[in-house]
Image: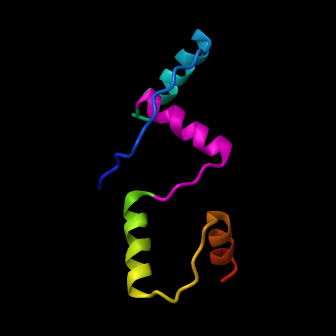
Amino acid sequence: MNTTSERKSRSVRIKTALDRHLEEMAKVENRSVNNLIETLLAKASGFKEPNEETKRAIEEARIERPHLKGYTDMDKLFEDLENE
């Protein structure tokens, strides 16, 4: 599975103690500090983006079933799925 996607580099200043805490969290979870921070920020901000496999499946469904209901809002999609 390809997990690479476009990234933007951003420099932030954080307290040394917080940096140590994040490094320890990342170590416990066997992941990079960058990955941990990105995941924490996405969860805290409510950011949702389908992965590449899901994007391909969506495109395939659009081609194979052009009359299916489409969504531009992921929250509406999840709401409809929960109400089925």
User: Is residue 37 rendered magenta in the image?
Assistant: yes
Q: How is the image coloured?
A: rainbow
Q: Is residue 19 above or below residue 68?
A: above
The quarter holding residue 31 reads top left
User: Is residue 38 rendered magenta in the image?
Assistant: yes
Residue at point 63%, 69% (across, down)? 78
Which of the two residues, 7 or 53, is positioned nearer the viewer here? 7
Q: Is residue 34 above or below residue 50?
A: above
The quarter holding residue 84 reads bottom right
Q: Position of residue 12 (x, y in %)?
A: 57, 19
Q: Position of residue 29 (x, y in %)?
A: 45, 35
Q: Position of residue 10 (x, y in %)?
A: 51, 25
Residue at point 62%, 45% (across, down)? 43
Residue at point 66%, 75% (across, down)? 82
Q: Is residue 78 left or right of residue 63?
A: right
Q: Is residue 80 left or right of residue 33?
A: right
The quarter holding residue 62 reads bottom left
Q: Residue furthest left?
A: 1
**The magenta segment:** 32-50
Q: Position of residue 34 (x, y in %)?
A: 45, 30
Which of the two residues, 8 or 26, is positioned nearer the viewer here? 8
